[in-house]
Image: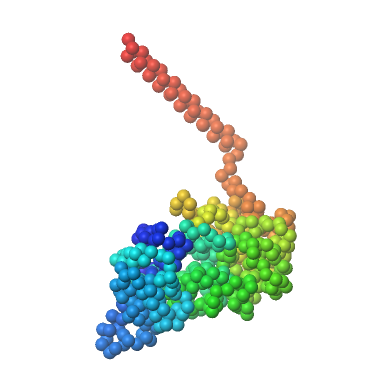
Amino acid sequence: MSKIIDEDLLWKAAEKLRDKCDPADYKNVVLGLVFLKYVSDKFVLKYNELKKYGDGREDEDDYYVAEHVFIVPKEALWSEVAAHSKSSDIGQVLDNAFILLEKNNVQLKGILPKTYSKSDLDKTALGELIDFFSNNLNMENADGDFFGQVYEYYIGAFAKYIPTKGGEFFTPKSVVELMVDIIKPYKGRVYDPCCGSGGMFVQCSKFVKEHQGLIDDISIYGQESNPGTWKMAKMNLAIRGLEGNLGDRNGDSFTDDLHKALRADFIIANPPYNLKEYWKPSLEGDPRWVFGKPDVKNANYAWLSLMYSKLAPMGKAAILMPNGATTSNTADDYKLRKAMIEAGKVEAILALPNKLFSNVSISVQCWILNKAKTNTNILFVNADSMGKLISRKIRVLEQEDINKIVKAYKDFENETLEDIPGFCKGANLDEIISKDYSLNPGRYVGADESNKMTPEEIQEELRKTSEELFKLMKEGKELEEKVKEILEEEMR
């Protein structure tokens, strides 16, 4: 990465909006400005480079497009916009800048924010924010990944202050890294039916880069029901020069499948948890219900079924689910879980620690589904004690944690797994049936008793502790006598 973001600086920028607009709007206001500053700075840098040739090539769009630099008309340049920062029409100036950007860059069509003039946001605060970015955020030498860091910081930071709706949570970077490292999407079609702001795809692209692969070897497919989030996902991909088919609009993956013919090599997703009101009459008899009709009052197994149905014959999926999904005993959930287990399509269940998410303290489990799997053995990993607390409310999985989990998965794949009490175990169908088809890792891995003391060791520890205690009591008694003598001497 070319730069490390200054999170304090970024948060100071966001704080300029405090009490000036709804916290839920912070994200759109700030990210729109960061996007404009980024594309403008990069365009100006490239323009000045090309102008040195003296042959007019700075006015040729192809030179910019070849290096994933967006075309920024004069009226949309940051310097032009910033000149109006203290003007009452700053909102309209910004909207016009984004309209021009969309006209000149086909990949941005219909996705940029153009509501600054209509927003209830205090225009003085908006101007102050623009001035703050002018003075503190130089992105000329930044790359798309740096913009991505800024983007992901704001998405995560704002998630702490915005109430979740329908069980939707911003997926932490360390969790995405774990999922990507498990399914290894080097090459092929990658799909996320509830893609949010596109963070899963970005991690996939990073993975390929780090392993000297070609980004062009990955085809990205996604869908998002929230129109604002769908636009941000498109921006997130565009800024990195990633091609992605996120549909021509936002849409509900259950009732408005924009990728009906798709069969993906990899699926990586964090769907809304325990979604209650998702069922519509049109979903009755849907061919995606491979394992049977899901519970119409809770979408957890509907998501699992939908994603499994979208896998290519050799495809794999990594899907985050609430803990309760592995043990749910509602009639439909139990029936579907039993069918998935007996078909041998559940490859692993990874229990993750709590406090990984910015705005909630829940813990989740990662389901690994494998369409090519032919046996009924399942890997169970209990990582609920892993991770490092970086604040009272936030925990992250460190690289050594991720490596340990990935190693257990690889060993399981290679049939060389050694069960580690309290951490991992491979279980066969008979054992799973004996636990009534529960997939809760805690029921399989047991407790780590490697440090458990024998009765003799316990007795020895008690003896040592008693000796230490008697010694302290004796020293305390001697000190008490000494103090008593001193006091009596003083009183004479």
Q: Vertically, is 64 above or below 488?
A: below
Q: Quadrant of residue 444?
A: bottom right
Outermost residue, bottom side: 55
Q: Residue 383: percent from the left, percent from the top?
A: 56, 55
Q: Residue at x 53, y 53 (%)?
A: 361
Q: The C terminus appears in which quarter of the rendering? A: top left
Q: Residue 29: percent from the left, percent from the top?
A: 42, 67
Q: Residue at x 63, y 52 (%)?
A: 442
Camera-side residue: 169 or 264?
Answer: 169
Camera-side residue: 468 or 57?
Answer: 57
Q: The N terminus appears in which quarter of the rendering? A: bottom left
Q: Residue at x 54, y 51 (%)?
A: 385
- Total labels drawn: 0
Residue 4 visible (yes or no): no
Q: Residue 384: percent from the left, percent from the top?
A: 56, 53
The answer to whether residue 179 is left or right of residue 95 is right
